[in-house]
Amino acid sequence: MDCIEHGAAKKACGASGGNMIRLLFRYLWREIATGIVMATSIIGALVFVVDYVELSRNMDGQPGVGAAQILQLTVLKLPGMIEQTLPFIVLFGVMWVMFRLNRRNELVAMRAASMSAWQFALPATLMALGLGVLGTTVLNPLAARTAAQFEQKRIAFMQGSGQAGKETDHAVWFREAVEEGIVVIRAGSVVPQSAELYDLSFHYYRLLEDGTPKVLHRIDAQSGKLNPGFWQLENAIDMSPVNAPKIYETLALNTKIAPSALLGNSVRAASLSVYALPGMIAESKKAGIGTRRYRMQMQQLLSLPLMLAAMALIAVSFSFKLVRLGGTMQMALIAGGTGFALYFASDLLQTLGATQVLPPMVAIWAAPVFVFFAGLARITILEDG
């Protein structure tokens, strides 16, 4: 029914149109939320299966490590993988919703109800921004915590099967002058969040007059912690070429190595939560250790909402072409390709930032800012010509 351009009828028509737009907005919010949940379920299930198979392959044949232990490790690793795939969850979730609305001609009906391209893009963009904020403030700390638990469980399982030393691939080394001579310290693995070290070996030796090293003794420990002024070792054994081995449940060894020395050797930026990064940056500055990797990680977490909003705009801007006009699959491929290009461009810029070619802020923010405004420009062209 056409609106009568005068009096109460005009007001009633305007109110009816406003109610219709609000209903359509609520419908879009619900559909987009459903699409993102479905994308999360599908991508999460795929990641879960791949991780489970990979962990099963790595731990195949090790005693004491069965399907239940591998399943437990896979569950602990899942939040971190979901965090990494959030951009693609938003991209494919919004694309699926928009193409479904297009296929069922609901986009045509909404356009006929005077909805603009901007009104289509607004719910998806706002939801992506909100999801990005939750990803930074909630999912990231959860992923950091479960990653630490994953590493602790993995080390415990490997120690139980007698394979802990063989499975470590991030060994940490220290060298220190002591009263006896020199000690070389090796830690097979480190849990950064708790500063715990596993599979420790202390090799004591002194240099003879001709420069030849003479081994004095060796201390092996199942685990330990570097405290200010001393090492606290657990389940240690002291072995010497001339004396019988001595076993200690706990053993304290004096050291001049500061706990901050672990920062530069063992703590990976990606293993820290958004709440732990500021403190790590301050501690690294105090210890004279470079902070670039931590600052870049902080900027990456802060830029996540914009990255997800850019992905949502890509999905929306390539979904307006009507199905009956053809080329829908081509638009879907272009949208997917643009999303992957954004992801790989971000990785390339981060590499340039890590090698000090670009400042951290430029390296992290350049790609999402460019794609976000490119998406806005495409929607402007679609709406205004």
Image (spheres, rainbow, N blue to C red):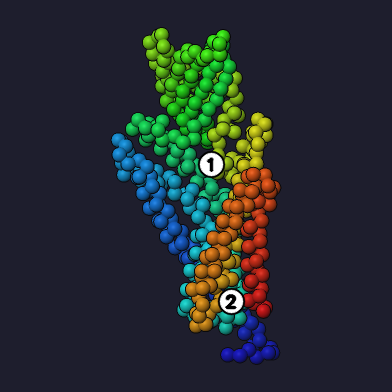
Q: Distance between the residues labelled 1 and 2?
A: 44 Å
Pick the residue in front: 284 or 180: 180
The residue identified by callout 1 is 271
Residue drawn where x is 61% and y is 49% of the image? 350
First of labels 1, 2 by sequence position:
2
Residue 2, by quadrant, is: bottom right
Pick the residue in front: 315 or 119: 315
- Quarter the N terminus occupies: bottom right
Residue drawn where x is 55% and y is 25% of the image? 174
The percent position of residue 371, horizontal first and vertical second, equals 63, 62
- Quarter the C terminus occupies: bottom right
Q: Identify the disc placed on residue 21.
A: 2
Does any portion of residue 138 appear in the rendered image? yes
Residue type at mark 1 is Ser
Counting other residues with Cα less than 10 Å from the Cα at mark 1, is it few (<14), some (14-19), or many (20 or more)? many
Q: Which residue lies furthest to the front in this view?
A: 210
Counting other residues with Cα less than 10 Å from the Cα at mark 2, is it few (<14), some (14-19), or many (20 or more)? some
The percent position of residue 199, horizontal first and vertical second, equals 44, 27
Query: Which circle, 1 or 2, is nearer the viewer?
Result: 1
Secondary structure of residue under mark 2: helix
Residue 181 as seen in the image, left or right of residue 381: left
Residue drawn where x is 48% and y is 65% of the image? 35
Figure check: 316 above or below 272: below
Residue 298 as seen in the image, left or right of residue 199: right
The percent position of residue 148, horizontal first and vertical second, equals 48, 39
Residue type at mark 2 is Ile
Residue 272, by quadrant, is: top right
Figure check: 209 above or below 77: above
Pick the residue in front: 130 or 341: 341
Residue drawn where x is 35% and y is 45% of the image? 57
